[in-house]
Amino acid sequence: MSSKIRQIHTELTRQEYSCTDLIKNKLSELENSPHNSANSILAKTALQKAQEIDQKIQQGKKLDELAGIPFGVKDVYLLQGTYATASADMLKSYKAPYTATAIQKLLDKGAIPIVRENCDSFGHGSSSENTVFGAVKNALDLQTVAGGSSGGSAVNVAKNYTVFSIGGDTGGSIRQPAGFNQVYGLKPTYGRISRFGLMAYASSTDCVGMFTQNLEDTTILLNAMSGKDFRDQTSVDSPKISEVSTWKTKPSNFTVGFYRNFIENEALDASIKADFINLIEKLQNQGINVQALDFYDAQTLVATYYIVAMAETASNLARLDGINYGERSDESVLKDGYALTRSQNFTQETKRRIVSGNQVLSQGHSEEIYLQAQNLRNNIMAHFANDFEQVNVILSPVAPNHPPKIGENLKNPLAMYLSDAYTVGFSLGKLPTLTAPFGTDIGVQITTAKNQEETAFQFAQFLETL
Amino acid sequence: MPLSVLSSIKDAKQSESVTKLFETIKQANINKNTENQENINLLNTSIVEVSSLREDTVIESSETEKQFIKANFPLQKNGFLVVPKVID
């Protein structure tokens, strides 16, 4: 499918319709949506920006291809003057004082944010049910979850309420909902896009990424948002992705890897497994080298990720104590106020992660649990480095199962954590991973070595033709 | 130290689900083979180097930003920002 961004840009500049009408239509669709994907709709500012774009078009001014394009923002990004709630009571009245670097780059090109999107609170979840705004409903089936934590963003793109949406991915929060709603979702190489202005969950794996309907739009957005930012010391400069039209149609001298134990995992749904094996066979029939690789088991990957992530989120969310901003439940005594504020205004799942994170960092536990997890992470990264000396891409399922019914997994946190088995390893490795909406009915993940996003995109384009 | 104090969350309890993750990690087989040390050091090479840190200078916030920061303060009275009592 060709670029939706470029199609709308052409139609706007030819004045086939106005930007104001485009934005009004999108706002109306969001307001009437049954999917509960919006925490707040930015009607007033979006229409103002649309009028400015219309004026520029009428004056014949040259516009960037992103000018006038309506997009969504996961409700964990700061966008000056808008409510930034993280889908939590703690921040329900908090207005962003400044704008995240990644979002500012899109604003500078004229793109128009129209909605702040529902998600798991502070990114804590894999279903977009852990939100004080109510569960997000899947774009394809209102009875099932949207996936998470960036569920609202995935649904908005799948339903065409937004042309693209900016999500956040810490352990699979873009890739899994992209698969569950059948859109493209990219977690770039860690550091490629600045995290400044993204509410921190687990700082060592948090990534800014995007949902789109096609690869060309993913490329446009990745190029627009990438780059070193002095406000994020972990950000890096990266090579620009070339135009899709210049890509090879079929990879040559190319080896695809897949993790044998992911496919032999008893928890993997039979139909997803059959579709994945079928895809591998199609590749072999096309003359592509395919290599089965060994990797860590799902339980070890999930445990390593969650221990690191919980420790980091416990530290990051310590700042939310009701003193400088956010809700404050008790005005009288400082220490009691902290505890009451945090007990009343964090969700159950967020509290579970904070408590567990503090536990693993405490004396006695840090050596045998936290440091052990960090050592395992080092081993996992070394394992990836070896694997990418043998293969160009690693292909894997997005999740072991189809999206569950809403409410089904809420009472079983361990089942929810284990549903992240196929995404968390690549987060620990800081590797770029694309979910492409084909291969199985919840898509496939394509992973490459760091900064090799273009290889993943070209391979996805080839897969689409099979 | 009790979890409620560590986390500043009342009635904080250990989670059964998370305890199972802890058990998995304790039993995990970690490769401590020194031959792999070069690759294992990859993690250390991806951290920020001191030589590339930004200058430690104060960057003034814009007036708009300052207004939002003040407006976000949970309680104000007679033009003052109200904080809880620290010492009785």
Image: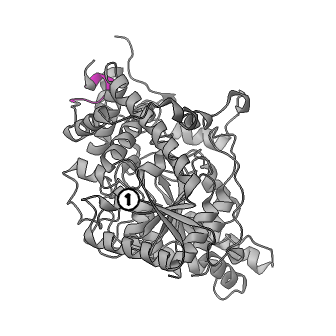
> In this picture, is A418 found above or below A139?
above
Q: Residue at x 44, y 27 (%)?
A: B82
Q: How many marks?
A: 1
By what rule are the colours in the image chosen? one colour
Q: Position of residue A264 (x, y in %)?
A: 30, 60
Whether residue A327 is visible to the viewer of this picture, yes or no, is no
Whether residue B85 is visible to the viewer of this picture, yes or no, is yes
Q: Position of residue A24 (x, y in %)?
A: 53, 77
Mark 1 neighbour class, 10 Å CA radius: few under 14, some 14 to 19, many 20 or more: some
Residue furthest to the top = B88
> In this picture, is B52 found above or below A180?
above
Q: Nearer the viewer, residue A123 or B29?
A: B29
Residue A259 is a magenta residue: no
Residue furthest to the bottom = A16
Which residue has dot 1 on it?
A260
Q: Residue at x 36, y 53 (%)?
A: A120
Q: Considering the numbered disc 1 on the image, is that residue within a helix, a strand or a loop?
A: helix
- A396 sits left or right of A132 in the view: right
Q: Residue at x 32, y 39 (%)?
A: A353
Quadrant housing the N terminus of chain A: bottom right
Q: Nearer the viewer, residue A432 or A53?
A: A432
- The residue type indicated by label 1 comes to Arg
Q: Position of residue A343 (x, y in %)?
A: 28, 35
The magenta-colored residue range is B4-11
- A185 sits left or right of A11 in the view: left
Chain to which mark 1 belongs: A
Which quadrant of the structure image shows residue B61? top right
- B68 sits left or right of A127 in the view: right
> In this picture, is A393 found above or below B77?
below
Q: Nearer the viewer, residue B19 or A140?
A: B19
